Amino acid sequence: MLALIAPLPVAAQEFQPPEGCTGFLTVQSRTCKVSNHWTCEGDQPGDNWRVDIGPNGPNFVSRINFEAEWVESHTLFPTRSSRLLSSADPMSMTELLTTGVDTYDFTVSRGEETERVTGFDQVIGGPVTIDGEELLPTSYSAKATAPDGTERWERSGNEYISARHRMFFSGSGFNERDGEEVPYDFSPVEFIYPGEDGFFASRPKYDCDVLNAGLDAAPAIVPAALEE
């Protein structure tokens, strides 16, 4: 999968899913990010993949399952892979949609190391609509600890969930590592489907540096989304 994605040229206009896979959604987001989502033959039912593309090309690939449970992810340049090892309390989109809150507790591998991730997602309001897509806003908090109990990172903020796709879409919040708190905002702006202009684009559109991306940044919007 990574061998097919990493060589994508920055100047390419369209991203192609790997052989045997079918694209179903593109999301253009704030802070110069576009995400392409696809499913593949041979995967478990409900599994889907995504690639995040920034101003310099693809930088992150991940796979989730039917419950929106994170299964694996790969950071590119340099490559670093993480995989789910076990879940004492699995992430559950069904529970979140049914009760409005879901907790999780699972262990992942990051190279030769492991870490435990704990946290929660909570629906905090009724549906909102962004570019015609009905979403539920959520709040979340998560942290990772090493086997000796040392905290490695902590994150909190707001995301969006789609009952239609059983997926999270990033919003805004804070990442904290080594005592430093860094804000982010990857809120969705456009949802693009097969046959629509911009589907499976290979370049982000919004909030990009003109010199790096060659595109005009869009004005900010106010809407009326666990990985590394």
Image (cartoon, helix red, strand yellow):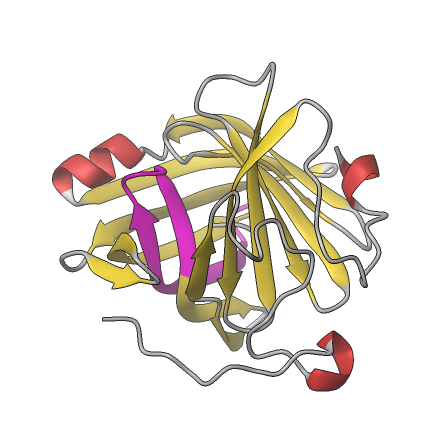
Image height of 25 relative to 94, above or below? below
Span highlighted in magenta in the image: 148-170
Instruction: Say how many tags the image has.
Output: 0
The answer to whether residue 180 of the structure is visible from this angle is yes
Q: Is residue 156 left or right of residue 10?
A: left
Give the camera-side residue of 87 and 81: 81
Main secondary structure type of the part rendered in magenta? strand
Horizontal and vertical percent position of residue 178? 59, 69
Give the camera-side residue of 15 and 158: 15
Horizontal and vertical percent position of residue 104? 35, 39
Given the current orientation, which residue lies at the most extreme top position?
A: 42
Image height of 2 relative to 43, above or below? below
Picture quadrant of residue 191: bottom left
Q: Is residue 203 left or right of residue 196?
A: right
Picture residue at 30% right of the left edge, 58% below the top: 132
The answer to whether residue 225 of the structure is visible from this angle is no
Image height of 19 relative to 51, above or below? above
Picture quadrant of residue 206: bottom right
Image height of 130 relative to 93, above or below? below
Picture residue at 73% right of the left edge, 39% below the top: 111
Picture residue at 34% right of the left edge, 37% below the top: 166
Give the camera-side residue of 133 and 71: 133
Horizontal and vertical percent position of residue 172? 41, 69
Q: Is residue 56 left or right of residue 89?
A: right
Q: Is residue 164 magenta?
A: yes
* Quadrant location, the N terminus: top right
